[in-house]
Image: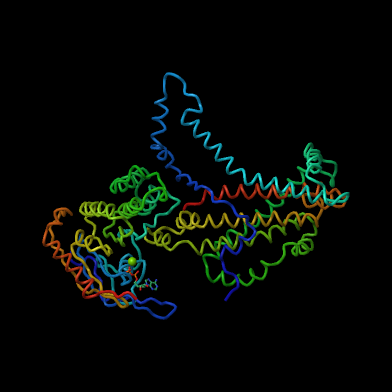
Amino acid sequence: MSAVTFNETHYSMNSPVTPPSPVVSPPPPPGLGERKNSQTNPQRGAEAGALPQGRKTPMWESERGQAFGEAVGKFFRAALPPLLGMALFILLWQIVSSSGGEHGLPGPAKTWESAKILFADPFYDKGPNDKGIGWNILHSLYRVGAGFGLAALVGIPAGFLIGRFAFLAAMVAPVISLLRPVSPLAWLPIGLYVFKQTEPASLWVIFISSIWPIILNTAAGVSRVPQDYLNVARVLNLSEWTIFTRILFPSVLPHLMTGIRLSIGVAWLVIVAAEMLTGGTGLGFWVWDEWNNLNVEHILIAIFIVGFTGLLLEQALVMVANRFNYE
Amino acid sequence: MHNYLHIEHARMVFDTKKGKFTALTDINLRVGQGEFISLIGHSGCGKSTLLNLVAGLATATEGVLLLAEKEIKGPGPERGVVFQNHSLLPWLTCFGNVYLAVERVFGAREPKSRLRERTQAAIELVGLSHASAKHPNEISGGMKQRVGIARALAMEPKVLLLDEPFGALDALTRAGLQDELMRIVQETKATTLMVTHDVDEAVLLSDRIVMMTNGPAATIGEILDVDLPRPRDRLSLAVEPRYHHLRSQVLAFLYQKHLKHAA
Ligand SMILES: Nc1ncnc2c1ncn2[C@@H]1O[C@H](COP(=O)(O)OP(=O)(O)O)[C@@H](O)[C@H]1O
Ligand SMILES: [Mg+2]
């Protein structure tokens, strides 16, 4: 038996738990758009037509106003626990930093002051090793994008092939299970040796560490296309191309999105570490540079930036993924 | 044609992890054109398997299946299938689901506008025009099943194969859809093979009821002629002694002769 099971749950360890989001239905196929709105919500039209002509209803009395009030209440109830959590976190940080005395960690206030200065001019450029924080973030994002893009370019077709042909799956299973657990940075020397330059080497590290979730999730999706859908394809005698575009691809898409999410998550984790080693530009380089300058506030800021950017990436991808959730 | 669908000595053996499993054996059946046949039997006896053989989704281990004197070698557009669990594609609208079938069958010969008309007509036939822009997850189970029927009908099949089409529905919805199916079949004159486990449904809709013995190695136990005049109406049938006689014959087959003991 092969050690690789094409089971996406194995690869979700790094993905933060995301709250279930409302289902968004995909748009109708082209050509059907005009049909869609033909009967949307007749009440709404009626409501608008039946606006009272005399005294204008104050906002808080109207149905709309009440709904607004309710929404605000709901928002505060939902926002309270996370805000409280953040406040406690900052308090804890303050306690830790003040208990350290002279050489303790910088506290929240000091870090905040430092961040204000830092973000006042994020895009200055004073030579190769001294660029604004904005440039460093953009450089890291660019590397993640490029490395991930390459991984998707190779990984998605590979995943479809592996999922479709059991023979191929059995063939690559041992190789994948051997290479997947390798720590991403272990690939860096190989990249440096082959490419003789740091830039392609760091892209290579992103590529090789983010390709596995894409391949494995796509393959899992393909091998799990419900038999019902395939029966429909057979009964309707659909052509291979139609089967791919109308059945296989849409059915795999949610799995593919999971793969992409995990993959970008990994890429973002890895890039900071890789840049520490390769130097030049990027958030990772900046962290290391500030460590050499012993500017601990900046290191703390960098940690927040890394976390926050990762969070934004994840949220954006979750939003995209929800578009393809048909259940 | 009294021999439109012809099944002779069909046998179906599955290869399973525990070895060979004979699901069906020695199935012989002749169905005339335009006939409505119900397959009834206890759960797991092989009704779906038999239907899949006719649909061409599975191939018999032994025996022959002929449709209009041609061997059934795979699925074909002259056979429309309504699946037990509707099997609609969730990323397409109701319209899109039906259009997929229409496009495949008529797409090479007819312009797009005509294909859309056909789709619309099929959806109208099952009374779902108002929901045609909706996605399957936005409509009820009964509506999904109707879209599944529309999809099969839109192909203008000569044979309609239905696998417990109303099994998952509540009694009221089911009755409505049975009436609708009766009307549609009368209109389209399709030869129909329907799997069911509902005795009333079988008697109401069928010309003949094929009663299957329990598996493994199930076969056709008896075939009952339902000689009730058409058009049939469920209310007047309810007071018809002949109806109750037929009904009790099916019940007797299922619960006296072939009672399935709970394992
Ligand atoms: N693909 C298959 N592989 C192995 N056994 C199967 C397969 N399909 C059906 N069977 C078996 O054949 C028997 C008949 O199944 P089925 O035709 O689905 O029954 P029914 O539709 O009458 O409930 C069952 O015992 C089932 O387990
Ligand atoms: Mg069945």
Please determine whether, in this image, residue A116 is positioned above or below residue B261.
above
Q: Position of residue A25 (x, y in %)?
A: 47, 46
Q: Position of residue A168 (x, y in %)?
A: 56, 69
Residue extending furthest bottom? B19
Q: Quadrant of residue A216?
A: bottom right
- Residue B63 visible somewhere in the drawing: no
Residue A105 lies left or right of residue B171; in this view the side is right
Residue B172 lies left or right of residue B135; in this view the side is left
Q: Position of residue B146 (x, y in %)?
A: 32, 52
- Residue B103 visible somewhere in the drawing: yes
Q: Nearer the viewer, residue A101 or B203?
A: A101
Please determine whether, in this image, residue B173 is positioned above or below residue A125.
below
Please determine whether, in this image, residue A201 is positioned above or below residue A59.
below
Q: Residue drawn 54% across and 71% down?
A: A167
Q: In the image, ligand 2 is in what quadrant?
A: bottom left
Q: Nearer the viewer, residue A184 or B215?
A: B215
